[in-house]
Image (tube, rainbow, N blue to C red):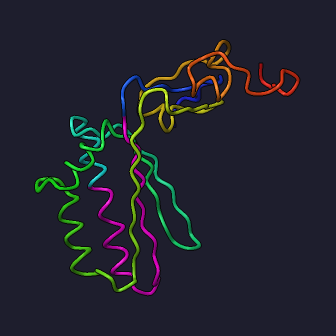
């Protein structure tokens, strides 16, 4: 289990980065073989990415839902170009999985897949973690910063990089 940081902290990236969301949704639960093949394609991809940080993958968090049966990976990358390079590389596991999906499932409606990509410039993201281990962007960066004073104490200040009042002082709870 990861060590909990007993504090309020934030994570900041000093260079541009990309957030990549990718998921799968089971539309026809009885077609187990089809959706299980799709679901089983992600672990080898993550293993390859964690083994080879030079590919640009920084970190990710996976979530599951039972009704409907679906999964999502929220991942952090150095750049969109790194995501694209991994997706298209013949020697990485994604391309073969994508070819298989298109051949075996295509548009039959049994399994849905999706992704969204966001590129973030420095100073255009904000995060807060209270009593959490390294997580999300903090895990991707590999460190966090306490938010006790100055511009880091509220979301608007963390986003804008300057000391601004987000709430009237009487509404600030955790000073």
Report which quarter residue 33 is drawn in.
bottom left
Q: How many marks?
A: 0
Residue 32 part of the magenta-drawn span = yes
Residue drawn 31% across the image and 73% down it: 37
Q: Specify the farthest residue to the left.
A: 90
Q: Is residue 94 left or right of residue 129?
A: left
Q: x, y (%) of residue 49?
A: 27, 45
Residue drawn 47% across the image and 80% down it: 27
Residue drawn 14% across the image and 53% down it: 89
Residue 56 part of the magenta-drawn span = no
Report which quarter residue 35 is drawn in.
bottom left
Q: Is residue 104 above or below residue 69?
A: below
Q: Is residue 98 left or right of residue 144?
A: left
Task: State which quarter of the image contains the C terminus.
Answer: top right
Q: Is residue 115 left or right of residue 102?
A: right
**Nearest the eye: 124 or 141:** 124
Q: x, y (%) of residue 57?
A: 31, 40
What segment carries the magenta color?
17-44
Q: x, y (%) of residue 165?
A: 73, 21
Report which quarter residue 3 is drawn in.
top right
Q: Is residue 64 above or below residue 4?
A: below
Residue drawn 56% across the image and 26% down it: 10
Q: Specify the farthest residue to the top.
A: 150
Q: x, y (%) of residue 83?
A: 27, 47
**Nearest the eye: 91 or 118:** 118
**Nearest the eye: 59 or 21:** 21
Q: Is residue 50 above or below residue 62?
A: above
């Amino acid at each position: 289990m990861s060590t909990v940081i007993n504090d309020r902290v934030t994570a900041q990236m000093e260079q541009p980065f990309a957030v990549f969301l990718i998921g799968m949704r089971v539309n026809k639960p009885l077609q187990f073989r089809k959706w299980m093949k799709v679901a089983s394609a992600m672990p080898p991809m993550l293993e390859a990415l964690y083994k080879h940080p030079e590919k640009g993958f920084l970190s990710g968090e996976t979530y599951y839902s039972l009704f409907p049966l679906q999964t999502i990976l929220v991942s952090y990358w150095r750049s969109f170009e790194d995501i694209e390079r991994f997706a298209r590389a013949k020697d990485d596991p994604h391309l073969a999985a994508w070819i298989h999906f298109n051949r075996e499932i295509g548009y039959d409606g049994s399994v849905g897949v999706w992704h969204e990509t966001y590129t973030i410039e420095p100073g255009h993201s904000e995060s807060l973690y209270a009593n959490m281990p390294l997580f999300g962007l903090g895990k991707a960066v590999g460190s966090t910063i306490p938010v006790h004073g100055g511009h880091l104490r509220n979301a608007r200040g963390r986003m804008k990089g300057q000391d601004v009042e987000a709430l009237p002082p009487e509404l600030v709870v955790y000073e």
